[in-house]
Image (cartoon, rainbow, N blue to C red):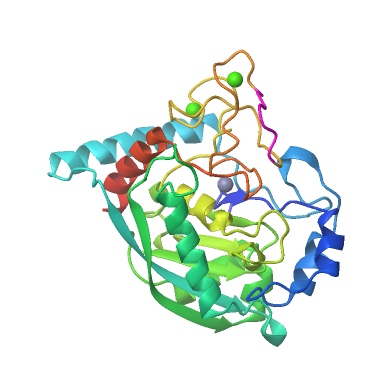
Amino acid sequence: MDRPSGIWRRVAGAGFALGLVLTGVTPAGAGAAGDVLAAFCADDHSSARVRPGSALPERNHITPAEQAAAERDAQQRFAARVAQGFTPAAAVTVPVVFHVVTGSGGAGNLTDATVSAQISAMNEHFSGGENAGAPDTGYRFTLQETKRWANANWFNNVDSPSVEADMKGSTRVGGASTLNIWSTNTGYLGFATFPSWYDRDPELDGVVIQYGSVPGGPIANYNEGDTATHETGHWLGLYHTFQGGCNGKGDEVADTPAQSSPTNGCPIGRDSCNKKPGVDPIHNYMDYSYDSCYYEFTTGQVTRMNSMWTAYRA
Ligand SMILES: [Ca+2]
Ligand SMILES: [Ca+2]
Ligand SMILES: [Zn+2]
């Protein structure tokens, strides 16, 4: 494919974490930690969360022109839906089909309990349960089915667009309102499709996560299940909080302060657009901060998700 096909939350190369993992135990439900350690043993590379030496292609670049076109399409679709009598729902329950893809020797074979913990984490995050000031988005997720696929090619090579298409095309369930999540050994923390891409590529619709990012997984600082929340935010139509940088329309959400670049870690008070009001929204699920740093979506993001749901998924 010759166009961006995913929005990627990148894996951090957290070299300092290696010792912690080696001296610890393999987290429950996380599968073989060795694969993850081999993949992630690299030094930290600041805010971009790029794995040093990675040959993975850049797949999340949304140009200003693409963003403008997407916004026009969304507004037209939303207006058409409203004209048909649809109104944004105050609460949406999303059925989830969770695909546990496994490699050789059962690598990545998340337990049912871990899958359940991942869904619970998403519900806590989307309900505003991590911070008193966080709004309840109204989105909830119910596990419709867990499917298990022993396929080392899908597991290890999902970052290849052809393998991704084969995996998704062979396994995806439901229509635009069903969230399919595939846990794999992707070299990224995760990636997702935007709702506006559904009509063009319905078989690709959904979220792919690194199996080590689930609650209790082996990826230090990114193992509280927040990656699935971040990717689901994209699936519901949210951009990164740093989309567009300091100027212009940014992430198209008014109550997330402008941000020039992704956040790494949890730098309280970071202000990457110091000529724009507000400090960076480092606690927002749509930044790149540590899982422990995330605690909110904003009311503006809720409004945007509802509009996108009405336009594309209702
Ligand atoms: Ca904003
Ligand atoms: Ca600022
Ligand atoms: Zn992302």
Q: Is residue 42 above or below residue 267?
A: below
Q: Main secondary structure of the magenta part?
A: loop
Q: Nearer the viewer, residue 46 or 268?
A: 268
Percent across and percent down for residue 85 are 12, 44
Please tell me in which quarter of the rendered image ligand 2 is found: top right
In reply to whether residue 194 is colored magenta, the answer given is no
Count of numbered marks: 0
Q: Nearer the viewer, residue 123 or 261?
A: 123
Please state if 17 lies on the left or on the right of 88 as rendered.
right
Please state if 69 lies on the left or on the right of 161 as rendered.
left
Q: Is residue 240 above or below residue 247?
A: below
Q: Is residue 239 above or below residue 12?
A: above
In reply to whether residue 268 is colored magenta, the answer given is yes
Q: Residue at x 69, y 79 (%)?
A: 107
Q: Residue at x 65, y 23 (%)?
A: 271
In this view, the residue farthest toward the front is: 132
In this view, the residue farthest toward the top is: 275
Tell me the quarter of the image containing the N terminus: bottom right
Percent across and percent down for residue 66 are 49, 36
Q: Residue at x 23, y 43 (%)?
A: 88
Q: Residue at x 72, y 41 (%)?
A: 48
Percent across and percent down for residue 92 are 29, 54
Percent across and percent down for residue 116 are 48, 71
Q: Image quadrant of residue 17?
A: bottom right
Q: Image quadrant of residue 106?
A: bottom right
Q: Image quadrant of residue 156?
A: bottom right
Q: Nearer the viewer, residue 56 or 134?
A: 134
Region rendered in magenta? 266-272
